[in-house]
Image (spheres, rainbow, N blue to C red):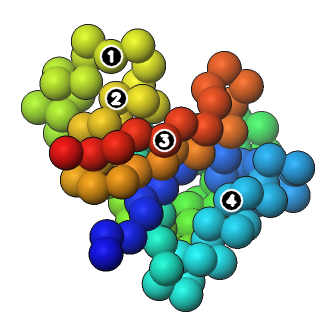
Amino acid sequence: MKKLKYLLDSYALLAYFQAEPAGAAVRNILKDASSNHVLAFLSVISLGEIYYIIARKIGEEKAGASVKDISCLPIGLIDVTTKRVLAAAPCESAASCLLRGCICRGNGCGIFGHNRHRRSRIQGN
C-alpha cells in the first residue's frame, strides 16, 4: 500500500511554528511522518519563503535557526528544477502545480496554510 504524501507550503509550516490553529493539522502530519505512516514534503521554494518572511520580520539569525529546525523535522525537501517550474506554469497556482508535478506518484495531499489556498487532495496516476 502506498503511503499518503503531503506537500506543505510555507504558510502551513509558519502556522505550525507559531502555534496557530492551522498548525494543528501540520502537527498531526508531522507526528504521522515521524511514525513512518505518511510522507511529508516541502519545496525548496517554500523553504526560501520561510527564510525570507522570518528574516524580514525578526532577522536573518532567527531565519537561519528556523531553517535548521525544519531540517530536523520528518520532511523531505523537493528541489524545483526549471523543467518542473515550466511544466507547472499552466496551472492555476504554484502550490497546486508543485503538488501535481512533484509528489503525485500515488495519492497526494497538499496542506496550504495561506487563506487563498485550501487543503486539496489529488489522486495520482
Q: Earlier in the sequence, mark 3 or mark 1?
A: 1
The image shows residue 83 at horizontal and vertical percentages of 11, 31
Q: Nearer the viewer, mark 2 or mark 3?
A: 3
Q: Which residue is mark 1?
A: 91
Q: Earlier in the sequence, mark 1 or mark 4?
A: 4
Q: Which residue is mark 3?
A: 121
Asked if marks 1 and 4 touch (Cβ < 8 Å), the reply is: no
Whether residue 69 is visible here, answered yes or no, is no
Q: Earlier in the sequence, mark 4 or mark 3?
A: 4
Q: Earlier in the sequence, mark 4 or mark 2?
A: 4
- Mark 1 closeness class: few <14, some 14–19, many ≥20 residues within 10 Å: few
Amino acid found under the numbered disc labelled 2? Cys
Q: Nearer the viewer, mark 3 or mark 1?
A: 3
Q: Quadrant of the N terminus?
A: bottom left
- Residue shown at the point (87%, 58%) measured from the top left: 19
Asked if marks 2 and 1 touch (Cβ < 8 Å), the reply is: yes
Classify mark 2: helix, strand or loop: helix
- Mark 3 closeness class: few <14, some 14–19, many ≥20 residues within 10 Å: some
- Residue shown at the point (78%, 54%) measured from the top left: 23
Left or right, residue 102 beside residue 35: left
Q: Rounded to the nearest whole Å, what is the CA distance between mark 1 and mark 4?
A: 25 Å
Left or right, residue 86 beside residue 30: left
Amino acid found under the numbered disc labelled 1? Cys
Check the image and name the residue furthest to the left: 83
- Mark 4 closeness class: few <14, some 14–19, many ≥20 residues within 10 Å: many
Residue 115 or residue 18, whichever sits in front: 115
Residue 112 or residue 57, whichever sits in front: 112
Classify mark 3: helix, strand or loop: strand
* Count of marks overlaid on the render: 4
Q: Which residue is mark 4?
A: 26
